[in-house]
Image (spheres, rainbow, N blue to C red):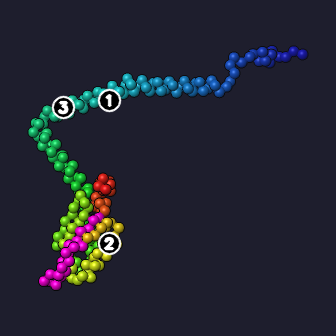
Amino acid sequence: MALPQNINEQLNRVPTRTPGISGRILMLASLIFAISFASYLGLEYGYKPYLTGQLDSLSKDIENFAKQIPPSEQIEIVNFYSQLSNLETLLSNHALPSLFFEWFEKNTQVNIFYQNFRFDITKSEIVLTGNARSIEDISEQLLILNQLPEVKKITLTNVSANPNKLWQFNLKVSINPKLIFHPSLSENQE
């Protein structure tokens, strides 16, 4: 029995290419390469010259602007900018010294008042001259300071009674620099 003509042709026809994943991978890789190459050419020969032109234009504008302002005024502008920058730095660090004085006030005994205050930044030391109503008040102040983790060392000197029925004393307190300075600055101090 003979097979019909169309079935016989289908059986005799050998596929020229076997379907598989390798052809698709090659096609995908070629497509990715073509897109990458086109992007490179576009950036290199299109966008790069555009950016170079913009940079040249801005450079010319800056030069023209610099020619319009006399050199003496340029120096004044630079000095003014420097002052503004320094002021910004001072103001940004201002909160920390203010916080220090709040800390100091909070940790001062009620019956003590200070006449002189000197802060040695290089040693992180506070040198104080104060008055107290009694020796016990001085002792309480020392106890308060001694319990604070920010205080490294306390030295009490020249305790004496004065005619006003007050006790005068000198106090030297070594503190952790982080109490005053910003943490990034205090690491350089230690």
Name which residue lies at 65% across and 27% down: 21
Is there CB contact under 8 Å for labels 1 and 3? Answer: no
Nearer to the camera, 11 or 131: 131
Q: Which residues are magenta?
A: 156-175
Q: Which residue is mark 1?
A: 51
The quarter of the image holding the C terminus is bottom left
Amino acid marked by disc 1: Leu
The picture places residue 95, in percent across and down from the top left corner, at: 26, 61
Quarter occupied by residue 43:
top left
Q: Return the x and y of residue 59 as percentages of the image width and height.
A: 23, 31
Question: Would you name the residue on which mark 3 appears?
Answer: 63
Few, some or many residues within 10 Å of mark 3 (<14, 14–19, 20+): few
Q: Residue at x 67, y 25 (%)?
A: 20
For mark 2, what is the residue?
146
Question: Quick one: label 2, few (<14), some, or many (20+) residues within 10 Å?
Answer: some
Q: CA distance from mark 1 to mark 3?
A: 18 Å
Sequence-first disc among 2 and 3: 3
**What's the distance in space between the residues labelled 2 and 3, CA to CA?**
63 Å
